[in-house]
Amino acid sequence: MEHSSFLSFVGDHLSQFLSYTAFANFTIGHGIMMIIGLIFIYLAIAREYEPLLLVPIGFGILIGNIPFFPGLKVGIYESGSVLNYLYFGVLQGLYPPLIFLGIGAMTDFSALISNPKLILIGAAAQLGIFGAYGISMALGFTAAESGAIAIIGGADGPTAIFLSSKLAPDLMGAIAISAYSYMALVPVIQPPIMRLLTTNKERLIKMKAPRAVSHREKINFPIAGLILTCFIVPTGLPLLGMLFFGNLLKESGVTKRLADTAKGPLIDIVTILIGLTVGASTQATTFLTSKSIGIFVLGATSFIIATTGGILFVKFFNLFLAEGKKINPLIGNSGVSAVPDSARVSQVVGQEYDKSNHLLMHAMGPNVAGVIGSAVAAGIMLGLLY
């Protein structure tokens, strides 16, 4: 009798233990998402596509898709869990401004200051955001959801997270993963579009070296930039304020320790947290939906429109510029704010046709303008739709 009772006791507890394992709660969806996570890690390590982003996100996808018994407070969506506390910075939009602080502290705006008209290319590339907004609305997404999805076209992960945390928190995982995926795939997606939309003559255009920018101009730029942009779009203040503040720390020359912290340890820590938690938020039970698939397609559409808009704007702008002052259309792609990857793509594609043509410094102008432009666009969307 006692022996039978003991066996029953062991059997019940063994059965309970097995019900808590991942094997008992595993679904095909979890398997699909884990494969996606492994692909992200492969692309980051083997192909070196944005490893600082894709390694944390890919591993986060693995963490988020290890199935568990509900109620154990281990999942990212379970109140009181450690992952849920870390995810708070994403949900409340805390991490993106800190990322922008670091970006500002590591960005040199000299190329833009020396040739201010390049900001127009960065503005033109935001066409992808507003184009994707219209398409999203036509496909049945709400106005707020469409605004959050459209920002993917800016190729700016932190901005996408910030805006979706306000406008469409339930779609944040899909939007963030889509935005970071396209940021990583800039060297793959943009070159074919650049070659298709330019002629050989246009690709060979050489631009004059940027003029030297004074220390005073570099200090005045973030102050003037903050006032001009945030007076127009106050809703962009969390991102633009931190971006320009970080740049002032860099350019002032008297806050080197603060600038080094912002562009080093601080941005590294936040990148780890934002990547890991965004990846973990892709639990198959909440992520694998028709909306998520639609967001990926719309994100690609937005990104292609943005790249196309930047290149075609340069071609149009050149109609009004004299010979010797024309802009190489290959830098039009850099209007999207994937800094500095899209500027590097301009350089790489340009040197395919002329090894002596150095476009990187010129491309950095619209590239950093794109960072400002995407934050302004996010502020406009937030002001209109929140």
Image (cartoon, rainbow, N blue to C red):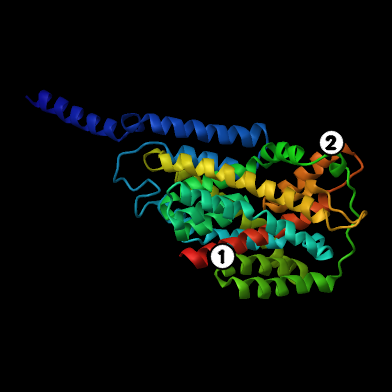
Q: Tag 2's secondary structure? A: helix
- The image quarter containing residue 188 is top right
Q: For this rendering, which residue is in front, 94 or 229?
A: 229
Q: Residue furthest left?
A: 1
Tell whether 135 sits left or right of 368.
left
Residue shown at 46% from the left, 34% from the top:
33
18 vs 54, left or right, is left
Q: Residue at x 63, y 44 (%)?
A: 304
Please say if 38 is above or below 120. above
Vertical comparison of 26 with 273: above or below: above
In this view, the residue in front, 312 or 373, is 312
User: Cα distance, mark 2 to mark 1?
Assistant: 38 Å
Question: Which residue is label 2 attached to?
Answer: 352
| Quadrant occupied by the N terminus | top left
Amino acid type, label 1: Gly
Residue 270 visible? The answer is no
Which x, y percent locates residue 230? Answer: 62, 72
Mark before the other along the chain sequence, 2 or 1: 2
Foreground of the two, 179 or 145? 145
Could you tell me the amino acid type at mark 2? Glu
Where does label 1 land, which residue? 379
